[in-house]
Amino acid sequence: MKGVCPNCEKISELEHIITTEELNVRGELIKVKVEYYKCTECGEEFEDPGSKDDPLEKAYREYRRKHGMIQPEEIREMRKLYGLTQKELSKLIGWGGATLSRYENGALQDDAHDRVLQLVKNPENLNRLIVKNESFLPEKKRKRLLNELSAAVEEVCSFPNILTERFGKYEPSIESGYKKLDLNKLFQIIKFFAKDGVLKSKLCKLIFYADFKCFKDYAISISGAKYAHAHHGPVPDNYEHYFATLIHDEKAIRVEEIDYGDYLGEKFYSEVGPDLSVFSDSELEVLFSVKKFFQSFNATQMRKFSHKERGYNETKVGDIISFDYTNDLQI
């Protein structure tokens, strides 16, 4: 492509270069993709001045992902969920006003501050802070928040979350998209894709693509579920258990058998609509984009498509498919 070189100020042919560099983040070398241009006239290299692609920001995001730390958008979404200003939340957790702002805008938090942020994500902990520091918020907002947090604490003790503690209590890792299993979100994803009816085999792959696409775009999965290599494609690990819970215990999914002659297929229909309020804006964007992308795919086409994934080809039946493979995801 041709353009103006900022060094020699001539219109020349510019070579677009994409490569990988290692940036030092707290003593750890983090690999990131970088893009720049090289002027064929003077040989100088320069970044695209109009690009918003910041290698250091990507390195920080990757560092957080590897260490299970909270990302900037998660901090903003958590704060806005409860209608708190940066100043109000900073006072509640005992920070200076500029600290929280820096983290929300991409600065890399230290380990101690990350632990505080992780704790505040729990509604029970936030509830305790508001009760303890009753003068930090206007009375009307304080009462509203305490009511909302009480309801949120009850939700934490709901059936899906009890099941999470019982059957899915594992630490975040690359196998879970650096997130703990959130059964409530997983169940809402299932109900979302089954709203208009979907074959079970296709449903498994839609869930897989939703979590893997979110990890590819935002460095964290939606549900924290692990995914396994099955004969017919990638599936949520223990998916039969999840489906059985929704069908028999929660009565949220209805199953219809479809006779294909040689075999019987199962089609799932949501009896209860999904609660989309549990998802962030970025998670919703991923869910709708995955649904739209595969809208015209039947179960056979979904199977063939998923079998082309590198994460599927480089594993064998029963293996967990690592989220490391998301860089090669087809969508």
Image: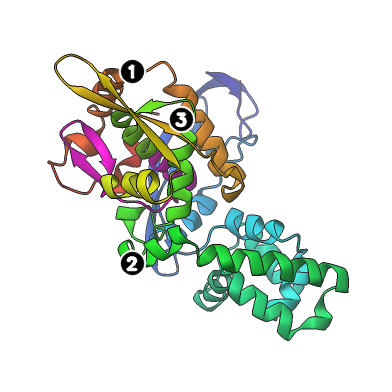
Report the coloring of the rendering. Answer: rainbow
- Label 3: element kind: helix
Closer to viewer: mark 3 or mark 2: 2
Residue type indicated by callout 1 = Asn
* Percent coordinates x, y for residue 241 in the rendering: 28, 50
Q: Residue at x 57, y 45 (%)?
A: 275
Image quarter for residue 74?
bottom right
Q: Residue at x 31, y 31 (%)?
A: 200
Start and end of the magenta stretch? Answer: 210-238
Q: Residue 225 vs residue 133: left or right?
A: left
* Percent coordinates x, y for residue 81 in the rendering: 68, 57
Q: Residue at x 68, y 61 (%)?
A: 79
Pick the front one: 42 or 123: 123
- Residue 166 marker: 2
| Label 3 environment density (alpha carbons within 10 Å; few <14, some 14–19, many ≥20) | many
Q: CA distance from mark 1 to mark 2?
A: 35 Å
Q: Earlier in the sequence, mark 3 or mark 2?
A: 2
Q: Residue 97 vs residue 245: left or right?
A: right
Residue type indicated by callout 3 = Val
* Percent coordinates x, y for residue 287 in the rendering: 50, 36
Q: Earlier in the sequence, mark 3 or mark 1?
A: 3
Q: Residue 244 vs residue 58: left or right?
A: left
Residue type indicated by callout 2 = Arg
Pick the front one: 309 or 199: 199
- Residue 298 marker: 1
Q: CA distance from mark 3 to mark 2?
A: 30 Å
Q: Would residue 170 be visible to someone looking at this image?
A: no
Question: Circle 3 sits on which residue?
Answer: 290
Q: CA distance from mark 3 to mark 1?
A: 14 Å
